[in-house]
Protein backbone atom coordinates (compact mmCIF):
# COMPACT_ATOMS: atom_id res chain seq x y z
CA UNK A 1 0.00 0.00 0.00
CA UNK A 2 2.79 2.43 0.94
CA UNK A 3 4.67 1.58 -2.27
CA UNK A 4 1.56 2.38 -4.31
CA UNK A 5 1.08 5.73 -2.58
CA UNK A 6 4.76 6.60 -3.02
CA UNK A 7 4.62 5.71 -6.71
CA UNK A 8 1.54 7.88 -7.23
CA UNK A 9 3.16 10.81 -5.44
CA UNK A 10 6.29 10.43 -7.55
CA UNK A 11 4.24 10.48 -10.77
CA UNK A 12 2.36 13.58 -9.61
CA UNK A 13 5.58 15.31 -8.54
CA UNK A 14 7.13 14.67 -11.95
CA UNK A 15 4.00 15.95 -13.65
CA UNK A 16 4.00 19.08 -11.48
CA UNK A 17 7.61 19.80 -12.42
CA UNK A 18 6.83 19.44 -16.12
CA UNK A 19 3.70 21.59 -15.71
CA UNK A 20 5.68 24.35 -14.01
CA UNK A 21 8.19 24.40 -16.85
CA UNK A 22 5.42 24.40 -19.45
CA UNK A 23 3.62 27.22 -17.64
CA UNK A 24 6.75 29.34 -17.75
CA UNK A 25 7.39 28.63 -21.43
CA UNK A 26 3.81 29.48 -22.36
CA UNK A 27 3.86 32.67 -20.29
CA UNK A 28 6.95 33.81 -22.20
CA UNK A 29 5.07 33.18 -25.43
CA UNK A 30 2.05 35.09 -24.14
CA UNK A 31 -0.20 32.01 -24.09
CA UNK A 32 -2.86 31.41 -21.41
CA UNK A 33 -4.11 27.83 -21.01
CA UNK A 34 -7.66 26.98 -19.90
CA UNK A 35 -8.19 23.42 -18.64
CA UNK A 36 -11.82 22.23 -18.93
CA UNK A 37 -12.89 19.32 -16.70
CA UNK A 38 -16.26 17.56 -16.56
CA UNK A 39 -18.04 14.22 -16.70
CA UNK A 40 -19.02 12.83 -20.12
CA UNK A 41 -22.20 14.42 -21.44
CA UNK A 42 -21.93 17.70 -19.54
CA UNK A 43 -22.15 19.80 -22.70
CA UNK A 44 -18.48 20.76 -22.48
CA UNK A 45 -17.82 20.41 -26.21
CA UNK A 46 -20.92 22.39 -27.16
CA UNK A 47 -20.02 25.25 -24.84
CA UNK A 48 -16.37 25.26 -25.92
CA UNK A 49 -17.35 25.35 -29.59
CA UNK A 50 -19.49 28.42 -28.95
CA UNK A 51 -16.75 30.13 -26.94
CA UNK A 52 -14.20 29.44 -29.68
CA UNK A 53 -16.53 30.80 -32.37
CA UNK A 54 -17.11 33.98 -30.36
CA UNK A 55 -13.36 34.43 -29.89
CA UNK A 56 -12.76 33.98 -33.62
CA UNK A 57 -15.48 36.57 -34.37
CA UNK A 58 -13.65 39.03 -32.13
CA UNK A 59 -10.28 38.37 -33.74
CA UNK A 60 -8.75 36.74 -30.66
CA UNK A 61 -5.95 34.28 -31.52
CA UNK A 62 -7.39 31.11 -29.99
CA UNK A 63 -6.80 27.37 -30.37
CA UNK A 64 -8.06 24.16 -28.79
CA UNK A 65 -6.81 20.69 -27.94
CA UNK A 66 -9.48 18.10 -27.21
CA UNK A 67 -8.70 14.80 -25.52
CA UNK A 68 -10.48 11.46 -25.78
CA UNK A 69 -9.62 7.81 -25.48
CA UNK A 70 -10.78 7.27 -29.08
CA UNK A 71 -12.35 8.99 -32.14
CA UNK A 72 -11.81 12.51 -33.49
CA UNK A 73 -15.49 13.45 -33.25
CA UNK A 74 -15.00 16.35 -30.85
CA UNK A 75 -12.17 17.85 -32.91
CA UNK A 76 -14.42 17.88 -35.98
CA UNK A 77 -17.20 19.58 -34.00
CA UNK A 78 -14.88 22.20 -32.53
CA UNK A 79 -13.22 22.93 -35.88
CA UNK A 80 -16.53 24.38 -37.11
CA UNK A 81 -15.73 27.39 -34.94
CA UNK A 82 -12.96 28.41 -37.32
CA UNK A 83 -10.28 28.07 -34.64
CA UNK A 84 -7.25 25.76 -35.02
CA UNK A 85 -8.16 22.48 -33.30
CA UNK A 86 -6.25 19.25 -32.70
CA UNK A 87 -7.43 15.92 -31.31
CA UNK A 88 -5.29 14.31 -28.64
CA UNK A 89 -5.84 10.57 -28.19
CA UNK A 90 -4.73 9.31 -24.79
CA UNK A 91 -4.19 5.62 -25.65
CA UNK A 92 -6.40 4.48 -22.79
CA UNK A 93 -5.35 7.04 -20.17
CA UNK A 94 -8.33 8.57 -18.35
CA UNK A 95 -6.65 11.97 -18.07
CA UNK A 96 -4.16 14.31 -19.69
CA UNK A 97 -0.67 14.87 -18.33
CA UNK A 98 1.69 17.80 -18.76
CA UNK A 99 4.09 15.77 -20.93
CA UNK A 100 1.33 15.11 -23.47
CA UNK A 101 0.33 18.73 -23.61
CA UNK A 102 3.93 19.87 -23.99
CA UNK A 103 4.44 17.60 -26.99
CA UNK A 104 1.46 19.07 -28.81
CA UNK A 105 2.34 22.64 -27.87
CA UNK A 106 5.84 22.18 -29.28
CA UNK A 107 4.76 20.43 -32.49
CA UNK A 108 1.44 22.06 -33.34
CA UNK A 109 0.37 25.23 -31.48
CA UNK A 110 0.18 28.22 -33.88
CA UNK A 111 2.77 30.88 -33.03
CA UNK A 112 0.30 33.73 -32.56
CA UNK A 113 -1.96 31.84 -30.10
CA UNK A 114 -3.01 33.88 -27.07
CA UNK A 115 -5.56 31.45 -25.61
CA UNK A 116 -5.33 27.66 -25.63
CA UNK A 117 -8.38 25.74 -24.45
CA UNK A 118 -7.75 22.14 -23.39
CA UNK A 119 -10.83 19.92 -23.29
CA UNK A 120 -9.74 17.19 -20.87
CA UNK A 121 -10.98 13.61 -20.95
CA UNK A 122 -14.57 13.29 -19.69
CA UNK A 123 -13.86 12.25 -16.10
CA UNK A 124 -13.98 14.10 -12.77
CA UNK A 125 -11.58 11.80 -10.92
CA UNK A 126 -8.12 11.37 -12.51
CA UNK A 127 -7.86 14.70 -14.39
CA UNK A 128 -8.39 16.67 -11.18
CA UNK A 129 -4.97 15.61 -9.84
CA UNK A 130 -2.93 16.63 -12.89
CA UNK A 131 -1.71 20.18 -13.38
CA UNK A 132 -1.33 20.93 -17.10
CA UNK A 133 0.36 24.29 -16.70
CA UNK A 134 -3.01 26.01 -16.96
CA UNK A 135 -3.80 29.61 -16.08
CA UNK A 136 -7.43 28.76 -15.38
CA UNK A 137 -9.20 25.53 -14.43
CA UNK A 138 -12.91 25.38 -15.22
CA UNK A 139 -15.08 22.54 -13.91
CA UNK A 140 -18.39 22.06 -15.69
CA UNK A 141 -21.51 20.16 -14.61
CA UNK A 142 -24.92 19.73 -16.24
CA UNK A 143 -28.15 20.14 -14.28
CA UNK A 144 -29.03 16.59 -15.33
CA UNK A 145 -26.16 15.22 -13.21
CA UNK A 146 -27.69 16.11 -9.84
CA UNK A 147 -27.02 18.88 -7.37
CA UNK A 148 -24.88 16.69 -5.07
CA UNK A 149 -22.09 16.12 -7.60
CA UNK A 150 -19.70 18.62 -5.95
CA UNK A 151 -19.86 16.51 -2.79
CA UNK A 152 -19.28 13.27 -4.73
CA UNK A 153 -16.25 14.68 -6.58
CA UNK A 154 -14.80 17.17 -4.11
CA UNK A 155 -11.25 17.16 -5.49
CA UNK A 156 -12.39 18.34 -8.92
CA UNK A 157 -14.71 21.04 -7.61
CA UNK A 158 -12.29 22.16 -4.89
CA UNK A 159 -9.56 22.72 -7.49
CA UNK A 160 -11.71 24.89 -9.80
CA UNK A 161 -10.98 28.54 -10.42
CA UNK A 162 -14.44 28.78 -12.02
CA UNK A 163 -17.50 26.49 -12.04
CA UNK A 164 -19.91 26.41 -14.98
CA UNK A 165 -23.39 24.92 -14.64
CA UNK A 166 -24.59 23.77 -18.07
CA UNK A 167 -27.88 22.82 -19.74
CA UNK A 168 -29.79 25.17 -17.43
CA UNK A 169 -32.80 25.03 -19.77
CA UNK A 170 -33.34 21.48 -18.46
CA UNK A 171 -33.26 22.43 -14.77
CA UNK A 172 -37.02 22.32 -14.22
CA UNK A 173 -37.78 19.02 -16.00
CA UNK A 174 -34.72 17.47 -14.30
CA UNK A 175 -35.96 18.61 -10.89
CA UNK A 176 -32.63 20.35 -10.28
CA UNK A 177 -32.26 22.11 -6.92
CA UNK A 178 -30.11 25.15 -7.78
CA UNK A 179 -29.89 26.39 -4.20
CA UNK A 180 -28.64 23.01 -2.95
CA UNK A 181 -26.09 22.87 -5.78
CA UNK A 182 -24.69 26.27 -4.87
CA UNK A 183 -24.49 25.29 -1.21
CA UNK A 184 -22.58 22.12 -2.11
CA UNK A 185 -20.15 24.01 -4.35
CA UNK A 186 -19.47 26.58 -1.62
CA UNK A 187 -18.96 23.76 0.88
CA UNK A 188 -15.96 22.42 -1.04
CA UNK A 189 -14.78 25.66 -2.70
CA UNK A 190 -15.84 28.81 -0.81
CA UNK A 191 -16.06 31.94 -2.92
CA UNK A 192 -15.76 30.35 -6.35
CA UNK A 193 -17.89 31.97 -9.06
CA UNK A 194 -20.64 29.87 -10.63
CA UNK A 195 -21.60 30.73 -14.22
CA UNK A 196 -24.91 29.43 -15.50
CA UNK A 197 -24.98 28.40 -19.14
CA UNK A 198 -27.28 27.14 -21.86
CA UNK A 199 -24.85 26.88 -24.75
CA UNK A 200 -27.41 26.23 -27.49
CA UNK A 201 -29.26 29.37 -26.50
CA UNK A 202 -26.03 31.30 -26.09
CA UNK A 203 -26.46 31.93 -22.36
CA UNK A 204 -23.18 32.12 -20.48
CA UNK A 205 -20.95 31.94 -23.56
CA UNK A 206 -19.83 35.57 -23.42
CA UNK A 207 -19.42 35.39 -19.64
CA UNK A 208 -17.05 32.42 -19.88
CA UNK A 209 -15.02 34.13 -22.59
CA UNK A 210 -14.81 37.37 -20.60
CA UNK A 211 -13.58 35.51 -17.51
CA UNK A 212 -10.88 33.82 -19.57
CA UNK A 213 -9.81 37.09 -21.19
CA UNK A 214 -9.64 38.76 -17.79
CA UNK A 215 -7.18 36.11 -16.58
CA UNK A 216 -5.12 36.52 -19.74
CA UNK A 217 -4.94 40.25 -19.02
CA UNK A 218 -3.70 39.70 -15.46
CA UNK A 219 -6.88 39.95 -13.40
CA UNK A 220 -6.80 38.35 -9.93
CA UNK A 221 -7.80 34.68 -9.98
CA UNK A 222 -9.88 32.89 -7.37
CA UNK A 223 -7.69 30.65 -5.22
CA UNK A 224 -9.47 27.34 -4.56
CA UNK A 225 -8.61 25.19 -1.54
CA UNK A 226 -6.94 22.61 -3.80
CA UNK A 227 -5.41 25.03 -6.28
CA UNK A 228 -3.66 23.08 -9.05
CA UNK A 229 -0.76 25.51 -8.75
CA UNK A 230 0.22 28.71 -6.93
CA UNK A 231 -1.03 31.29 -9.45
CA UNK A 232 1.58 33.96 -10.10
CA UNK A 233 0.94 36.91 -12.42
CA UNK A 234 3.51 38.49 -14.73
CA UNK A 235 4.05 41.32 -12.26
CA UNK A 236 5.51 38.77 -9.86
CA UNK A 237 3.24 38.54 -6.83
CA UNK A 238 1.32 35.49 -5.74
CA UNK A 239 -2.42 35.99 -5.21
CA UNK A 240 -3.56 36.16 -1.64
CA UNK A 241 -5.93 33.43 -0.58
CA UNK A 242 -6.02 29.86 0.56
CA UNK A 243 -2.80 27.88 0.19
CA UNK A 244 -2.32 25.73 -2.86
CA UNK A 245 -1.75 22.01 -2.79
CA UNK A 246 -3.19 18.53 -2.98
CA UNK A 247 -4.67 16.55 -0.18
CA UNK A 248 -2.09 14.25 1.38
Image (tube, grey):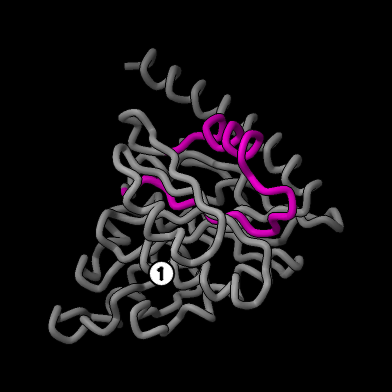
Q: Quadrant of residue 139?
A: bottom left
Q: Quadrant of residue 143?
A: bottom left
- The residue at 75%/68% (across/down) is 217
- From the viewer's side, name the closer residue of 31 and 193: 31
- The residue at 68%/37% (across/down) is 22
Q: Secondary structure at mark 1?
A: helix
Q: Extreme right residue here?
A: 235
> Is the residue marked by circle 1 packed among few (<14), some (14-19), or many (20+) residues within 10 Å?
many
Magenta stretch containing residue 8, yes or no?
no
Give the left or right position of residue 189, taking residue 26 as reference: left
Give the left or right position of residue 71, taking residue 202 as reference: left
Residue topped by disc 1:
47
Q: Position of residue 128 (x, y in %)?
A: 43, 45
State the count of labels. 1
- Vertical relation: 12 (above or below) 121: above
Q: Position of residue 140 (x, y in %)?
A: 38, 64
Q: Extreme top residue here?
A: 3
Magenta stretch containing residue 110, yes or no?
yes
Q: Position of residue 225 (x, y in %)?
A: 52, 55
- From the viewer's side, name the closer residue of 53 and 123: 53
Quarter of the N terminus within the rendering = top left
- The residue at 29%/38% (across/down) is 70
- Vertical relation: 193 (above or below) 38: below
Q: Quadrant of residue 4?
A: top left
Give the left or right position of residue 211, taking residue 140 as reference: right
Residues in magenta, as a range: 96-122
Amino acid sequence: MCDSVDATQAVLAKNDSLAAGLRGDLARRGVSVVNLLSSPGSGKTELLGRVLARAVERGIPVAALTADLATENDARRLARSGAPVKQLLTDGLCHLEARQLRGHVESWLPEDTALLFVENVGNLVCPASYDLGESLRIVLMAVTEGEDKPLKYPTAFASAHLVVLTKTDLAEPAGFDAAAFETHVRQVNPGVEIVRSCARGGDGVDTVLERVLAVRDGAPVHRPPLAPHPHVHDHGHQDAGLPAGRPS
